[in-house]
Image (tube, rainbow, N blue to C red):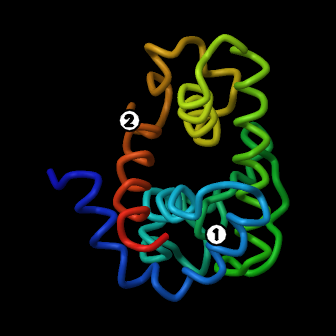
Amino acid sequence: MPSYQTLAQDDSGRMEKYKPMIKRVGGGHQIEPSLIAAIISRESAAGYTLDVGWGDNRKAWGLMQVDVTPNGGNHTPRGNWDSEEHLNQATGILVYFIGRISTKFPSWSRAQKLRGGIAAYNMGDGNVHSYDGVDANTHGGDYSKDVLARAQWYKNNGY
């Protein structure tokens, strides 16, 4: 199986057209653009895996796959699937979960809170129970680990 960073590199050509938007949204939310690019890479391979913006059997919308199911995020999609409005919505959700994890686990380091928030973005903060098992309930059991590895690749490559 290819490494997470190889997967990020594989998506980099498709990601390039979103780079200016990603940088603006990251700056607006005080989130590293490389992290937004990494989530886009993990969630939709920079749009490659989507069917007219939809993924996960039409349960999620856009590049960052905002959950629209009533028992999941129950979000109303904003903007086109590949728009800055969508990226702002999804990044706002990520920031919300980082905040929830920070409150839930105040003794965690900043890096641990970030990783927990990334995991919560995938599965909700109610499924984060400990740092040792932060990815236990995520899709593939490796979501935050994968996203952080991809983010490192994007950071090293101009995001």
Pick whichever of labels 1 and 2 is earlier in the sequence.
Answer: 1
In the rendered structure, which amino acid carries the disc numbered 1? Gly
Q: Residue at x 59, y 57 (%)?
A: 32
In the rendered structure, which amino acid carries the disc numbered 2? Asp
Q: Residue at x 58, y 40 (%)?
A: 118
27, above or below 67, in the image: below
Residue placed under numbered mark 1 in the picture: 62
Q: Nearer the viewer, residue 108 or 15?
A: 108
Tell me the quarter of the picture where residue 56 sits.
bottom right
110, above or below 44, in the image: above
Could you say which disc has been placed on residue 97 in the image?
A: none
| 13 displayed left or right of 23 | left
Q: Residue at x 42, y 83 (%)?
A: 14
Tag 2's secondary structure? loop
Q: Nearer the viewer, residue 51 or 82?
A: 82
Residue placed under numbered mark 2 in the picture: 142
Tag 1's secondary structure? loop
| 92 displayed left or right of 14 | right
Q: Which of labels 1 and 2 is toward the front? A: 2
Q: Nearer the viewer, residue 54 or 44?
A: 44
Disc 1 to disc 2, C-alpha distance: 21 Å
| 13 displayed left or right of 96 | left
Disc 2 packing (10 Å; few <14; some 14–19; many ≥20) = some
Where residue 37 sits: x, y (%)?
51, 65
142, above or below 24, in the image: above
61, above or below 46, in the image: above
Where residue 133 sits: x, y (%)?
45, 16
Disc 1 packing (10 Å; few <14; some 14–19; many ≥20) = many
Where residue 143 sits: x, y (%)?
44, 40
Q: Residue at x 44, y 57 (%)?
A: 42
Where residue 13 sits: x, y (%)?
36, 84
